[in-house]
Image: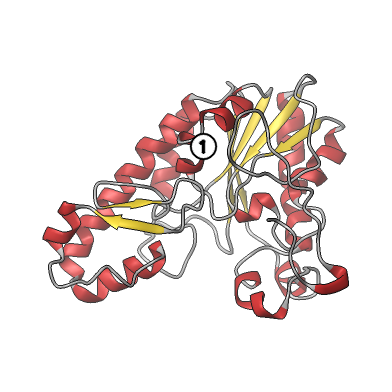
């Protein structure tokens, strides 16, 4: 259910489905028989807590349909495990992929939920062997899992981090290979891509400049967007959310940030049309 219970001012995300996909996307439903741009990504692309997310703003600027395929807490596995959603993206004239963290993917050490990729499902035998002292029964989210692992054994955690980075690159290449030839990567974070991404507090987790450059041959363009101080300051006031979700809202871009993203994306996409 994608209606936020925030009283009379709650946002209606016009939830819809495309084809045989089990995922629910933000609407209104677009007519796929007409040319369209597909936008893939996580909660920011979906536009949680904002009335008009950047896919809708780009659509208005371009005068061309934009299909918002963003998923709440989604990463590449969201699409790689949903052939119907990937087919919709593949049918676009161009695709934009918001970069999400390396933790939100099933990998040699743990599995994640196929649609809510922030959900930790199970540790593999390899992870249990590496961290025999860790009890995984009360861990439900990937970020919490990584925090526990780093505290338990920093040396062993380095092995997990390396595997997550390698896994992310492999799955991103697999995802990009299923998209149209004109494809754009979108970096949306509070700061530019770092030279070394080892913090568990800076999203997207573990993604550094070298990893983006490794993907450059696979894409048409990489768009780097970092919100202005003004846009960040407006975020608490240009979003709609219940008070019980204030912590989650603080981690997502507000309407002013979405407007800045659209200003960066629209000219790049116009050049590809």
Q: What is the quadrant of residue 157 in the picture?
A: bottom left
Quadrant position of the N terminus in the picture: bottom right
Q: Of residues 32 and 169, which is closer to you in this image? A: 32
Res 220 seen here:
no
Q: Of residues 150 and 227, which is closer to you in this image? A: 150
Q: Residue furthest bottom?
A: 243
Measuring from the top left, give residue 80's x and y in whole percent: 46, 35
Q: Of residues 21 and 52, which is closer to you in this image? A: 21
| Residue drawn where x is 69% and y is 22% of the image | 93
Q: Is residue 209 above or below residue 266?
A: below
Q: Is residue 61 above or below residue 137?
A: above
| Residue drawn where x is 88% and y is 71% of the image | 8
Q: What is the quadrant of residue 145 in the picture?
A: bottom left
Q: Is residue 135 left or right of residue 225?
A: left
Q: Is residue 187 left or right of residue 11?
A: left
Q: What is the quadrant of residue 211 in the picture?
A: top left
Q: Is residue 247 left or right of residue 233?
A: left
Q: Of residues 211 and 16, which is closer to you in this image? A: 16
Measuring from the top left, give residue 259's x and y in whole percent: 79, 54
Measuring from the top left, give residue 159's x and y in whole percent: 20, 56
Q: Is residue 170 above or below residue 198?
A: above
Q: SS of the residue at dot 1?
A: helix
Measuring from the top left, give residue 49's x and y in whole percent: 73, 63
**Residue identified by numbered label 1:** 79
Q: Is residue 15 above or below residue 170?
A: below
């Amino acid at each position: 259910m994608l209606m936020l219970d925030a009283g009379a001012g709650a946002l209606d995300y016009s939830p819809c489905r495309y084809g045989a996909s089990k995922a629910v996307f933000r609407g209104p439903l677009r007519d796929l028989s007409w040319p369209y741009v597909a936008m893939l990504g996580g909660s920011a692309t979906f536009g949680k807590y904002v009335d008009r997310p950047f896919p809708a703003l780009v659509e208005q600027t371009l005068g061309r349909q934009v299909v918002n395929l963003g998923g709440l807490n989604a990463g590449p596995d969201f699409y790689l495990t949903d052939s119907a959603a990937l087919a919709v993206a593949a049918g676009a004239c161009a695709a934009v992929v918001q970069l999400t963290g390396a933790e939100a993917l099933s990998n040699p050490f743990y599995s994640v939920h196929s649609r809510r990729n922030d959900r930790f499902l199970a540790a593999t035998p390899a992870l249990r062997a590496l961290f025999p002292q860790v009890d995984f029964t009360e861990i439900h989210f990937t970020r919490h899992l990584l925090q526990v692992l780093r505290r338990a054994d920093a040396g062993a955690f380095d092995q997990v981090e390396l595997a997550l980075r390698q896994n992310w690159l492999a799955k991103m290449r697999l995802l990009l290979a299923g998209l149209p030839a004109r494809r754009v990567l979108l970096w949306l974070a509070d700061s530019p891509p770092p030279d070394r991404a080892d913090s568990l507090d800076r999203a997207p987790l573990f993604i550094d400049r070298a990893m983006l450059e490794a993907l450059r041959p696979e894409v048409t363009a990489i768009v780097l967007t970092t919100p202005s101080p003004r846009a960040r300051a407006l975020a608490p006031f240009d979003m709609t959310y219940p008070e019980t979700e204030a912590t989650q809202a603080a981690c997502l871009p507000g309407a002013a940030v979405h407007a800045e993203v659209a200003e960066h994306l629209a000219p790049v996409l116009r050049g590809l049309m």
